[in-house]
Image (cartoon, helix red, strand yellow):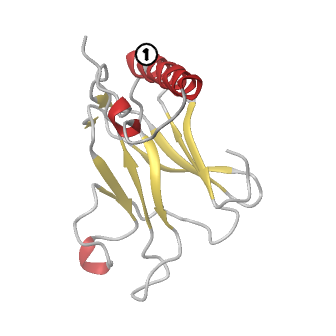
Amino acid sequence: MHLQSSFSLEAFAFLRFNSRMKLRYLLLLLIAELLFWFHTARAEAHPVINEVMWAGSDLSFSDEWFELTLPVCETCTDQDLGGWTVSYLKSTGQETLMLTFPSGFTMHLGEYLVIANNQAASSRLLAEPAFVSASLTLANSGLRLRLKDPAGTVIDEVDDGVGTP
């Protein structure tokens, strides 16, 4: 298995360090390489919530959407999202279902999916969203979204910066 790393000794070639400093940097680079390899070799891809547009737009206060992505890694595969759910927490703490992905729906590595309240024609989105859900509600404060697998395990959670997901 061949793994590529973003670290390079050539980046430090212009620096002039004494032998002891060079040894420290080489040791740090070696540790970083090992950590990179360890993480990448054992990584499992799972979708994450990577962007949230909760404030609406000049077209409508309900012109809201969020985006999922499936990060790429060398040992990962596409993800079947059938039965996965997205929910939000109300200010009362009650969890409310927003979307359930249909059976057999596959997300591909590196793909971005937009889930919106409106079609692109009624939104500031430049392309059609993957899913449109009239139940998409993104609170202006106290926002908390949860992405769960079919077993109900929280895979990703985001909030508006006031919680600790």
State the image quarter where residue 47 is shown. top left
Residue 111 location in percent, x, y?
27, 44
Q: Is residue 9 visible?
A: yes
Residue 83 location in percent, x, y?
41, 33
Q: Where, quadrant-wise, is the C terminus in this rendering?
A: top right
Which residue carries the number 1 mark? 42
- Identify the residue shown where x is 41% and y is 18%: 37
Please determine whether, in this image, residue 151 is positioned above or below residue 157.
above
124 or 41: nearer the eye? 41
Q: Where, quadrant-wise, is the N terminus in this rendering?
A: top left
- Identify the residue shown where x is 45% and y is 70%: 64
- Identify the residue shown where x is 49% and y is 23%: 26
**Label 1 secondary element:** helix
Q: Residue furthest right?
A: 92
Please determine whether, in this image, residue 78 is positioned above or below residue 96.
above
- Identify the residue shown where x is 71% and y is 51%: 94
34 or 60: nearer the eye? 34
114 or 111: nearer the eye? 111
- Could you tell whether 44 is left or right of 22 in the image? left
